[in-house]
Structures are given as structure tokens and as C-alpha cells.
Image: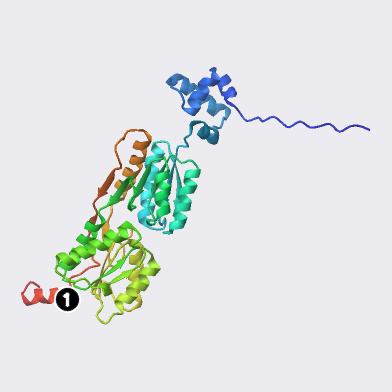
Amino acid sequence: MTKSKRTRPRKSTAPTMLHVAEAARVSVATVSAVVNGTAVVSPALTARIEAAIKDIGYKRNAIARSLKLGKTRTIGLTVADITNPFFTDVVSVIQEVLHRAGYAVMLCCNDEDIETQDDQIQLLLDRMVDGLIIAPAGDDANLKRILEGTNVPVVLIDRICDGVDTDAVVLDNQRAVFDATTYMLHLGHRRIGYISGSLDTSTGRDRLAGYHEALDSAGIAFDDELVRLGNFREADAYKAAMQLLTQPDRPTAIFSANNLMVIGVMKAIRDIGLSCPEDISVACFDDFPWADVFRPQLTTVAQPVRAIGEQAAQLVLDRLAGKTENGPRRLVLQGRLMVRNSCRPHASLVQGAREHGAL
């Protein structure tokens, strides 16, 4: 009876550093220095090794390299809502800057949920990212604990967390809403509805503070019946706007604290049979690509999206390069009011102008 032959496992035919070294006529140590970036190699030798890598199809083992160097050349990025054009644009800029610097981006979206946010940040840290850029869904003790326990650079964007000392790039949200509300007041509006974002976020609180400040400066008493919570979501803002518009003494203008919520506001105005700006003026926070093709064209507060993304990415890169040894840096940028035609003077202002012969 013939005994069956034992088959030996086939040897891997994948090219190795030894094959690269033989093709480039250098030592394996020199190849390793180029592949892993562990030593300086002359441009001529580097070019020869890179050519050999390409010719024989050698694939760098990114996982093994990361374990050896303790670096992944990856930055973790988590945002509150990737469907929001503001976050989409900021992510695009961050990725562009980091890609030029040789870093990949691992993106997560927490959908404005704090528990999801904390799980994602822990996941990114478990994946050994070299740094984190976070647009927080809100303040919570667990997030603070995670950030205080990490040794990688962290940059907060758009929103900050009280008690967390880390680099941040934010807007002067209070001033921006103050300017927008003041503009509506100058148009003669005195009952200005305000649809707020989540007050669990710094942006939600700061923007509402800007609304308060504008009313105070104009000597107008705050009326809590004119403020409704929209949670930065279209559906919640629709309900909030319907509540405002069905009041016996409805507002003559509405300010929406972000761009997604203004869509809910405009739908509510339509569904209740009113028109903007003929019956009610509307303005919102965050400019977006189709703001000037809306009918009417929307008056908005534009954020410097490119500057936010570029500076956030650069803060991380500077920390990784050891260029900054000082404490946390907070960069506060300014918004810009984009006046279009979704706001018009209140009827009383128009009538006064007519009586004085200005119209």
C-alpha cells in the first residue's frame, strides 16, 4: 500500500526586504531605514531603493511598521454630524492638509450622541492614532476622563469642553449671533424668534448668549416664549418653528442657530401658509453652498471653514513635530454676516419711512 505524501506548506512568494536589498544592491538595514524612516539615507540610495520596491512589487507592512515605531501616521477625527455641510467642508480641508503632510484620517460621526462619541474616541485611541481632532457632541465626565488620560495631541474644533485643557479652534459664536440679531433689530423687528441648538454644547450656549446680549443692548426685554430648542436638527427645528408661528402674537423674524435647522424653519413657514420674507424674515448661522440659490436667498453667518480646518490640522502637526511646548492654545476666529434678501424691514419701519417721505 502506498503511503500518501505529506504536502509541505508553500513558501510565501511575496517580495521581502531581502529581495529589495538584492535588487537595489544595498544592505537589508539600508532598505529598512528607508521603509521605516529610522535613519537618514542619501537621496541617491533612497531613489534606488524606491525604484526597486516599485519594480519587484514589495508591499510595506503598515501594521508591523506601526508596532515597531509606535506611530501609525493616522489622525482620528470625530464630528457631530457629517450630513451638516459645515462639518463636511471642515473635514475635507483637514484631510487635505494632513494628506499633504503624509497622514491618513480615520473619520467617525457621532450623530450628536455623547455615548457614541466616547466609544468612538476610545476606538480611535485603541487603533493607535497619533492625534485626535474632535468636534464634541457635548460635555460629559467620561469624555474629560478619556482626554485627560491620553498622551496624544488633541484639538477641539467648533466646540469646546469646560474643564478640558487642550488646543482648540473655535468661532466667536456669541459675537456672531449678536451681530446677526442686531441686524434684524435695525430692520425694526422687535419680536425675534430664536431656535437654539443643543444647550449641552458650547456653541448652543454661546449663540443663545449672543441673542440675549443683542436684546439687552437694544433695551428689549427677553421673552422666553420666543425661544425654542431645535437641537441642531431639521425635524426638531420644524416643530419649534411651528410652535413660534402659531402663537397669537407670532414673531416677525426668526433666527436659526444652524443651517440644518433653517431648513425645518422654511418648511414650517411654507406649511403654515406664510411667505419669507413677506410675512416673516429669516436668518441663520452657517453659510452653505446653496444659501444664495434659495428663494429667497438666505441671510447667514458665514464661518471661515477653510481657516478652521487648516489651523486645526496644523495644531496637531505642530504638536507631533514638537514645535510647541507651551500650554493649550485656543484660536478664536470671527464670523461674517452675509446679508441677502430673506430679511426685510418690519412693516412699522416701512410705514415710518413713508410718513417721513423717505419712501
**Residue 147 shows up from this direction:** yes
Q: Residue at x 34, y 52 (%)?
A: 161
- Where residue 26 appears, x then y in whole percent? 53, 17
Q: Would you say 226 lies left or right of 37 here? A: left
- Where residue 21 appears, x then y in whole percent? 56, 21
Tell me the quarter of the picture where residue 175 sits.
Answer: bottom left
- Residue tagged by mark 1? 347
Which residue is farthest bottom? 248
Tell me the quarter of the picture where residue 150 sits.
Answer: top left
How many numbered discs, if any?
1
- Where residue 60 appears, x then y in whole percent? 54, 32
| Helix, strand or loop for disc 1 | helix
Which residue is farthest right? 1
Of residue 175 and residue 222, the one placed in the foreground of this image is 222
Q: Residue at x 17, y 68 (%)?
A: 185
Of residue 317 and residue 280, the one placed in the foreground of this image is 317
Q: Would you say 163 lies left or right of 146 here? A: left
Say which quadrant the C terminus sits in: bottom left
Q: Would you say 63 lies left or right of 142 here? A: right
Q: How is the image coloured?
A: rainbow
Say if 271 sits above or below 104 in the image.
below
Which residue is farthest left? 356
Label 1: few (<14), some (14–19) or many (≥20) C-alpha neighbours in 10 Å: some
**Residue 291 shows up from this direction:** no
- Where residue 62 appears, x then y in whole percent? 53, 35
Tell me the quarter of the picture where residue 354 sits.
Answer: bottom left
Q: Would you say 147 lies left or right of 211 here? A: right
Give the amino acid type for the residue marked by disc 1 in the picture.
Ala
Q: Residue at x 29, y 43 (%)?
A: 329
Of residue 284 and residue 171, the one placed in the foreground of this image is 171
Say which quadrant the N terminus sits in: top right
